[in-house]
């Protein structure tokens, strides 16, 4: 993979937020060309910055240019057995590819780095996006089902409401005659007097709308009619008409 060094260096030090950053010790193996090809192992303390799937490392925290870069694709991050405690390794799938052995300052730092590096690759992000798309699709289906359910119950509830004669709209209730007066007129609830023409104009219109079965309003309205009937009966008694 060819990378533009200038662009990469700018991205490493620009103001874009880092996904993780901190000091790690990086293992360095030096080959001594003696008869037995002795390998000397040492560790360099470097400042690491993770941005996306790019792991930069600097000589110092204040350095303006990285001294190295690890592209976190086609690799695994795992704990490793090493002489140093809190060590982990970045190993690539390609045979013969270099492995990066890093050492953190403590258990918590090591776990945070392993988690961050394991989630940095595009392969991981692709899996996350697929899972989120699946969850979103299931959530949309559930929401659609919930939106349909109340409408069905509402319509069935209205059918049951209309099938019960006691719950019919008020204007559909039949007129009942008591003492020659209609206690509930079929023409919108305005009582009409058949025995005393003078009573109807004095009666107020019903405050109950055809779609509202409010008991308190209904009770008040009937109470006014009863009071008017009682006054008329008292007037008849005074006139000597029992």
Image (spheres, helix red, strand yellow):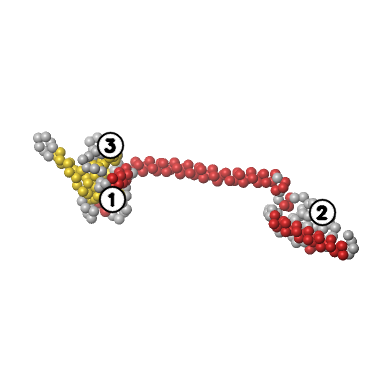
Task: Look at the image and tell me in which quarter the N terminus lies.
Answer: top left
What crowding class fits label 2: few (fewer than 14 Cα within 10 Å), some (14-19), or many (20 or more)? Answer: few
**Local crowd size for mark 3, using a 10 Å CA cut-off: few (<14), some (14–19), many (≥20):** few
Picture coordinates of residue 138 (x, y %)? Answer: 48, 42
Residue 215 is at least partly visible in this image: yes
Gap between marks 2 and 3 measured at Cα: 97 Å
Q: Which mark is residue 178?
A: 2
Task: Report whether 49 appears left or right of 229.
Answer: left
Instruction: Using residue 62 as the reference point, say whether residue 155 is left or right of it.
Output: right
Q: CA distance from mark 1 to mark 2?
A: 91 Å
Residue at horizontal 44 percent and vertical 41 percent from the top: 134
| Residue nearest the viewer, comparing 129 with 175 | 175
Looking at the picture, how far across and down is residue 233, in whole percent?
84, 61
User: Which quarter of the rendering shows the C terminus?
Assistant: bottom right
The secondary element bearing badge 3 is classed as loop
Residue at 45% x, 42% y is 135
At 72% from the left edge and 52% from the top edge, which residue is drawn?
Answer: 170
Residue under numbered circle 3: 93
State the residue position of label 1: 21
Check contact, mark 3 vs mark 1: CB within 8 A. no
The answer for how far apart the CA atoms under marks 3 and 1 are is 25 Å
Q: Secondary structure at mark 2?
A: strand
Question: Along the polypeptide, which appears first: circle 3 or circle 1?
Answer: 1
Q: Residue at x 30, y 49 (%)?
A: 20
- Spot the residue most to the left: 35
Q: Secondary structure at mark 1?
A: strand
Against 93, residue 220 (above or below) is: below
- Residue 111 percent coordinates (x, y): 30, 44
């Amino acid at each position: 993979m060819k990378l533009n060094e200038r662009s990469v260096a700018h991205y490493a030090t620009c103001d874009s937020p880092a996904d993780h950053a901190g000091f790690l010790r990086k293992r360095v193996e030096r080959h001594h060309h003696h008869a037995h090809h002795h390998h000397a192992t040492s560790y360099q303390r470097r400042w690491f910055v993770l941005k996306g799937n790019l792991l930069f490392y600097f000589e110092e925290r204040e350095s303006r240019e990285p001294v190295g870069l690890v592209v976190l694709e086609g690799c695994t991050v795992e704990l490793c057995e090493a002489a140093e405690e809190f060590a982990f390794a970045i190993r690539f799938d390609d045979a013969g590819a270099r492995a990066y052995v890093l050492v953190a300052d403590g258990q918590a730092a090591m776990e945070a780095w392993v988690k961050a590096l394991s989630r940095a690759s595009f392969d991981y992000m692709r899996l996350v996006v697929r899972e989120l798309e699946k969850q979103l699709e299931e959530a949309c289906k559930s929401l659609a089902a919930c939106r349909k359910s109340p409408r069905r119950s509402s319509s069935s509830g209205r059918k049951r409401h209309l099938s019960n004669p006691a719950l019919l709209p008020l204007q559909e209730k039949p007129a009942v005659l008591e003492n020659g007066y209609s206690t509930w007129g079929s023409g919108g609830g305005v009582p009409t007097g058949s025995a005393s023409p003078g009573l109807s104009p004095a009666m107020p219109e019903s405050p109950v709308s055809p779609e509202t079965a409010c008991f308190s309003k209904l009770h008040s309205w009937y109470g006014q009619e009863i009071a008017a009937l009682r006054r008329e009966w008292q007037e008849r008694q005074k006139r000597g008409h029992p």
